[in-house]
Amino acid sequence: MAIIKTEIRRGVYIDSAKLMKLQRSLADFDGILDTGVIMGTDSNKELLSHIGLTSPEILASKPDELVIALKADDEKSAEFALSKVDELLAARKGNNDQDYQPRSLETAAGMLPDANWVIVSVAGRYAAGVTREALRLGKHVHLFSDNVSIEEEIELKKQARELGLLVMGPDCGTAMIGGMGLAFANKIRLGPIGIVAAAGTGLQQVACRIHQLGSGITSGIGTGGKDLSEKVGAITFLMALEVLARDPDTKVIVLTSKPPSPKVAEEVLKKARKAGKPVVINFIARPVTTLRDGNLFFATGLDDAARLAVELANNPPQIGSDIDVDLKIFKPEQKYLRGLFSGGTLAYEAQYILAGYLPKVWANSPLNKENKMENSLVSQEHSIIDLGEDEFTVGRLHPMMDNELRIRRLYEEAKDPEVAVIMLDVVIGYGSHPNPASEIAPAIKKVLDDTKKANRHLEIVCVVTGTDEDPQDFNEQVKLLKEAGAWVDPSNEVVVRRIGRILRALAERDSEDTAAIGKPVDLESLKKPMQAINVGLESFSENLKDQNAPYVQVDWKPPAGGNEKLAGILERMKNL
Amino acid sequence: MAIIKTEIRRGVYIDSAKLMKLQRSLADFDGILDTGVIMGTDSNKELLSHIGLTSPEILASKPDELVIALKADDEKSAEFALSKVDELLAARKGNNDQDYQPRSLETAAGMLPDANWVIVSVAGRYAAGVTREALRLGKHVHLFSDNVSIEEEIELKKQARELGLLVMGPDCGTAMIGGMGLAFANKIRLGPIGIVAAAGTGLQQVACRIHQLGSGITSGIGTGGKDLSEKVGAITFLMALEVLARDPDTKVIVLTSKPPSPKVAEEVLKKARKAGKPVVINFIARPVTTLRDGNLFFATGLDDAARLAVELANNPPQIGSDIDVDLKIFKPEQKYLRGLFSGGTLAYEAQYILAGYLPKVWANSPLNKENKMENSLVSQEHSIIDLGEDEFTVGRLHPMMDNELRIRRLYEEAKDPEVAVIMLDVVIGYGSHPNPASEIAPAIKKVLDDTKKANRHLEIVCVVTGTDEDPQDFNEQVKLLKEAGAWVDPSNEVVVRRIGRILRALAERDSEDTAAIGKPVDLESLKKPMQAINVGLESFSENLKDQNAPYVQVDWKPPAGGNEKLAGILERMKNL
């Protein structure tokens, strides 16, 4: 019968790569059935117990203790394997053939003064310290380590922003800079597409698909999966976007992220709209409401993002201003929309589309309850009123047959000095009013004359739904409305998106750019040949070697041999 | 100073068109500033008060009382106008020149025996009764009236389904049948596209845009905006979809709806997948997660739906079976997916895509909290496990470097007789395991051999992320995995959608078709020239006249003169 044998070692620090190698080597001895070499954390102990490796000693072990557990045919085999542990731990480190490994980052930086990057993959609790040191030395950091707190992440990224340095991570699996891969990274052809990703394997998937489709990338900048959380606020993401927007070699940018904070996603899109080049967006689980918004192209997935980016790089689209009115004609207080609808579906669609442009649109018949107008008769901020709703039609004609109520409301809304745009739908056809424009157009004209007298510009926009075979004559209706001064289109989507763009621009005109601005990232630092210092997993040095990039592996040990109190004192002394 | 004068009439029933006309006529008298002619409901009274027409009498009026309110320059003008009310109400009804108007639907049906449709636009509280009568006479009903309760709607629709008749409505603004418009409807060219719409102006917008793009429609079938609510369960919508699927003239179907119940929307999509022709979907506010799923094409809006439909009608796509495995190779109890991921983003994307195929997918790192696995070590139903999550990597190597934990888990999952599909991602490149397929492929082979011995088929599917320039050799990795028996693709989306299709088909194999089936709608009844009976707004008869469709207008009055108790007795007597 199989036996379980355990050895616990206290106060030992061994990195996870070495643990794995030890575990593998132990499993190769005769009579050994299964092995587990772990630090005694709860989740590790659970994993071991799940594979049948458990004992009272294992259960009692602590996170800073090394647990070596063996399932063996007999006592003798187990004891023999355990007797070899020291020998195995002392064996040669990896196949990195660097002659001398400095003990400190500072020494390493002296050995390789042109190194622009430091790769950090030490255990999470030490990672912030190493990153801080790297920033102090003026290096970008690829922070592979996980288990770094969000507070530390924010502090490191803010500090880096002041210095114009990128902190890619924590928990950043991959980056591809200037044709060179860091950590988990694929060999991707150089090409016209730049990628920013809060999504490790997302970045790899997009980059590989771009390569497979025959194109290539300038850089693929990882940020760590939490960069687009509300707390972190996309610090690294926005820095990376900004530098790629500035890079003349990057013709198309791809932005991808694990599910982001909706608010932060909006902030990123706002900046992306100003990139001056096509930007493909794939934020996982963020619904696609349109395939294009100006220079932004929305993908339904990672693969689709790659396909779109390659297409756009091969056939560059026209990217012009997306506003066809001069914003200066509006007064500073003008910012709101009033949509006066006769068609319920058109009103719903307008709300859905506008959600992509405006923070909140009130409605008497809202898509989401929290946007319900307090009083359907009194508009507030952006409001969309469906005048065909029961509340307006009990005992009255539907507003498609009778324009009176809508015209009254139009007069009312036009008087509000905060209103910038009024939208009306004019739905013709059998059953509808025999000539709605004959009543609505003069009302529009009156309103525009009145607001002109009050020295304001009011934008009145109409969707006309109908055909040239309808009894009212579609073309005549459009003509009357245009002559009165309205902007008219037969597509509800076209009309509403135009409104969205105008109002968004008006809002941005008002809003200060609240995002903190640090020093811009030096574009050249992403372009010049990669040289890196690696602190942690040796295999990352091996990668650099395989790619012929100069590197230095640091023979890193926890400060004060893992004694955190002493380490804290040393850290404070260094900063004096 | 202006005065307000009011007259209240009790026990009078006047339809809303006549009220409007009265209001208009009164406003034309000299000295009259504003008028309101309403039934005394709360919302009507509020509307009047908002335009400054209010008085103690108006406030005291009741829903069944007619309120005639005038704002006038002086008492005399007001009194003169009020003295003309009876005369105005007695004036000729509209310009419908029908010589004799029958009082009952039954008489009308006798006068026009080939009438296939009844249009009902009487006040909501009487509409169900008229509809019931129309169904009894074997007619489809266009139920324009609103303020019909959802309970009545369900009852009417269930009854109609048994009879193979359509109840379009209540609150159905529009329908276009065989080139003829009912109620609010546009004149649309006949053509290859059929539309089903729980969205009145949505139907009009889509139909008009199709017309403007040079194409046309077979039918545009409205259902009323609540048809896709959970309570109604898409009764009319599914009947309409079924008959259009059967119609050889309909080459492409468009389905559109105001925001539907997600559950009912899924039910509709399930049927739509079996339509055997391209179906364009635009359910407002339902996020688009893919642009195509087999014969389903997803539009981002009404305009986009029209564009897509015209494109598909002009260039018919290949519509084949979307499953490339024979479902019979799975045992009846096999139905679940186990996704064993090393890449967090790939696992997230898989969850997001699968939400379009499967009711619930558990995950250790879920997109939505309610899908969180109880225990990451123990899979349940469909599970996606990201083995690169912290809980698995503390003190261990990442699963991209070390395949051991995933292979263990693969063996475990394969033993579960309810598992049909196992997915693995294999991410290569620098940093990753030097030859993952050399370990994973033999494990896959072993698992497939074992399950074969147990007389089960297990589908193992891999996404390989990497390039031909990666150190591991992408093509060799793919080859090893394929030789072991896995289905392999470089696109996560392609792999996950294939899994979604297989598992959805397995689920549908199991699930009984729970939707109640009535009598199918007679296709010919939608094709033969329109003849209709109109009960309510006379302008709808005028529309039919303008379109040269035979019609009969019913001179309808509420049963028992509006006395509902007596009406109830009469109704019960009729059913004896």
Image: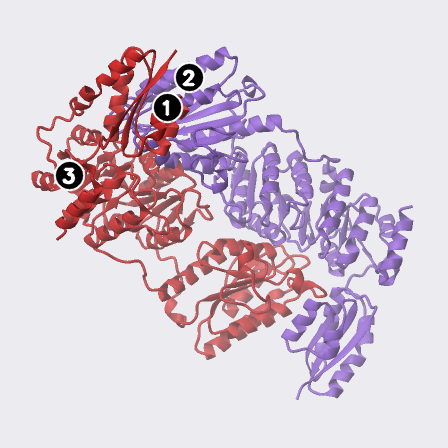
Chain colours: A purple, B red
Closer to the camera in the image, A201 or A406: A406
Which residue is identified by label 2? A485
Residue count near mark 3 (Cα–Cα under 10 Å), binned few <14, some 14–19, many ≥20 = some
From mark 1 to mark 3, how far is it between C-alphas? 52 Å
Q: Position of residue B369 (x, y in %)?
A: 56, 56
**Chain ID of residue with mark 3:** B
In this view, B515 is above or below A323 = below
User: Which callout, 1 or 3, points to the residue nearer the camera?
Assistant: 1
Q: Position of residue B244 (x, y in %)?
A: 26, 47
**What amino acid type is highlighted by mark number 2?**
Gly
In the picture, measured across the screen, residue B360 lies left or right of residue B121, that is right
Residue A41 occupies which quadrant of the picture?
bottom right
**What amino acid type is highlighted by mark number 1?**
Ser
Going from N to C along the chain, the mark reached first, 1 or 3, is 1
Residue A225's tag is: none
Residue B55's tag is: 1
Marks 2 and 3: in contact by CB < 8 Å? no
Q: Position of residue B575 (x, y in %)?
A: 14, 51
From mark 1 to mark 2, how far is it between C-alphas? 39 Å
